[in-house]
Amino acid sequence: MASDSGKTMWRRPAGAIAAVALAMIVAGCGPGDGGPNPDAGQATSGTTAETGAPAQPSATAKPPAVDPGWPRWGFTHTGTSANNISPRFEQTVAGSLSQTPMLQNQHIMGFGALNPQPRRQEFFWEDLDSRTGFMKASGGTQVITLCCAPDWMKGGPEGMTSGEGWAEHLEDAPYPEHFDDFARLAATVAERYRDVEYFMVWNEFKGFWKDHRKPADYKGYTQLYNKVYDAVKAVRPDAKIGGPYLGFDSNRSGRSELRGDWGVVNQNVLDAFNYWNEHKKGADFIVVDGASPTDAHELLPDEFGALSKFSAVTTWLREKTGDMPIWWSEWYFQPENGTKWPEGKRLAVQAASMMEFARSGAATALYWNPQTKDTACNGCLWDPRTGAPSATQRLIENFVKWFPAGAKLDEVSSSDPKVRVLAQPEQLVLVNTTDGAATAEVDGKEYELKPYEVRWSSR
């Protein structure tokens, strides 16, 4: 959705009312759309995680410890969420989520929130108030993403955002002369929402990386980040701030220090991360996102083997940052090219991906909730028509309950390499990674699993 140029001229707004503007908010914040980058960077031996196909990853190495008090699993609200339907619907979903509280994240502009500062001296908090109110009502640990920027900070007019503004300019970065203005807005948000502890700065280098075949404007992003960091810490020393919220794109081939059977991370990503990491004012946690498919929608070597990318990136980041908490602000495991999977398979791949995060010691993983308003939705956390919890919500709740940040992982193997297993002292979860029935002995017990079955079992 980014414009072709940061200096693109805006047409005068067409007087769009808030309801129309909200309808224009797009809830897709997926991996970057850059193409392969075979010439990026000098090849090195690199860090890799266990790769290979459906085989159960080995658990010979103890994963890094994660602070038991750290919030681990949750989701991001998008264009339409439970607070946008009806009071009764909102109460239904809030009641369900409150049974197993988790992290909940909301952006300050876009993805369900209108322009928070339409004019230099005018603020609009209704949408953020509504979303944070829902987070509290449902028992969630609140997170705010400090993105995106009001129109007047990026070449547009003051006033409510027009339809064109949402469609063409939401993902534009603020101009450098407005970095201080955005930092002040971020500080104002932090002051207003004092019960929010965690803040992520910007989103996927939006506006700072228009062509993923070329280097990102990591100096510009880092300048913005540092101003936001200083401004928020000045008014909220207790706030925890993370960046750079950078998408770890990967391709089939190319020169990069981070590679595996799942592909090769774009060296431009690593260069951007390294610059930010070396020049940041500070950070309380590291934020990244990414997808197991390559930019060309390939699953290497297959849909389950590709998931080892998440462990590889997490391990690389922990080594680079001295074992700082690693947040996956978004993660994707299904190709975004129209590929459709049966719901059972989609859930199996999602469960296996979450096992990778737990096994590699990722501190936090936020699920991007693809909520729709009134139609069937595979992957939504609740039924868009009734508010009833979905199988996806139940899956995340089980990880919240059984694999929190401080969970001790036990080394448990499966007699069938097609059945993956993750275990802690009281519970284990098994995933059949095939479209056929499977029988496996795990932890001294025989399990018969249906195709793509995800099974939770006490020990």
Image (cartoon, rainbow, N blue to C red):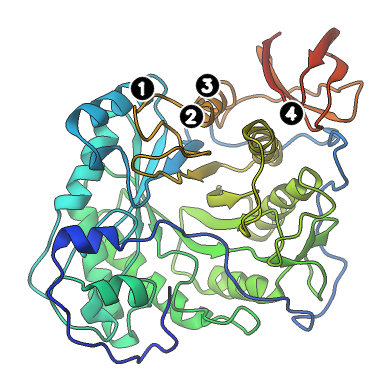
Q: Position of residue 187 (x, y in %)?
A: 23, 62
For label 2, the SS is: helix
The disc, 4 or 1, on the residue closer to the chain's N-terminal end is 1
Residue at the disc numbered 2: 393
Q: Quadrant of residue 236?
A: bottom left
Earlier residue among tags 4 and 2: 2
Residue holding disc 1: 96
- Residue pictured at 74% horizontal, 28% vertical: 452
**Viewed as shown, does residue 431 lie left or right of 57?**
left
Position of residue 294 measured from the top left corner of the image (x, y, whole percent):
72, 62
Q: CA distance from mark 3 to mark 4?
A: 22 Å
4 vs 1, front mark: 4
> x, y (%) of residue 122?
8, 68
Q: Is residue 449 above or below residue 157?
A: above
| Residue 235 visible here | no
Q: Secondary structure at mark 1?
A: helix
Residue 83 is situated, as x and y percent measured from the top left of the image, at 24, 39
Q: Give the Cα distance between marks 2 and 3.
A: 12 Å
Instruction: Please name the residue that numbered disc 3 is placed on.
Output: 401
